[in-house]
Image (cartoon, rainbow, N blue to C red):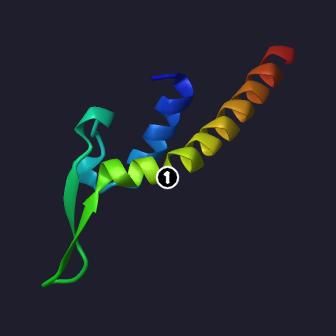
Amino acid sequence: MSYRERIAFAMFRSGLPKHEANTQLEELRKIEEPVSENMGDEIDLSVDWALNKWSYLKLADAALLELGVLIEEARRS
């Protein structure tokens, strides 16, 4: 996995419930997310990642570009 994909996946994981926050790409599975006291919703994390991957990759691109600017600024000063 490239740095870009790793950053994108880290951003994706940051939105997961705490007990799923350290999930690896190979471990994505269906989870039960409570909606109310008596109801739950099943979420397939692998499908969720597949549907949202390109959005997270765009965010990773923006982060990497900004990091490059910060590094260049630090080198000049």
Q: Amino acid at mark 1?
A: Asn
Q: Is residue 2 above or below residue 49?
A: above
Q: Residue furthest right?
A: 76
Identify the residue at horizontal 58%, vertical 50% (top origin).
55
| Number of numbered markers | 1
Residue 75 drawn at (x, y percent): 80, 15
Residue 51 drawn at (x, y percent): 46, 53
Q: Is residue 14 visible?
A: no
> Which residue is at the front of the view, 55 or 16?
55
Q: Is residue 74 visible?
A: yes
Left or right, 35 with respect to 74, comes to left
Left or right, 70 with respect to 30, comes to right
Left or right, 32 with respect to 10, comes to left
Residue 59 drawn at (x, y percent): 62, 44
Q: Is residue 70 above or below residue 36?
A: above
Residue 5 drawn at (x, y percent): 51, 31
Identify the residue at horizontal 39%, vertical 55% (top origin).
48
Q: Residue furthest top?
A: 75
- Disc 1 designates what residue? 52
Identify the residue at horizontal 66%, vertical 36% (top origin).
61
Q: Is residue 19 above or below residue 69?
A: below
Q: Residues within 10 Å of mark 1 (few under 14, many from 20)?
A: few
- Image quadrant for the C terminus? top right
Q: Quadrant of residue 32?
A: bottom left
Check disc 1 and report its element: helix, strand or loop.
Answer: helix
> Which residue is at the front of the view, 39 or 30?
30
- Image quadrant for the N terminus? top left
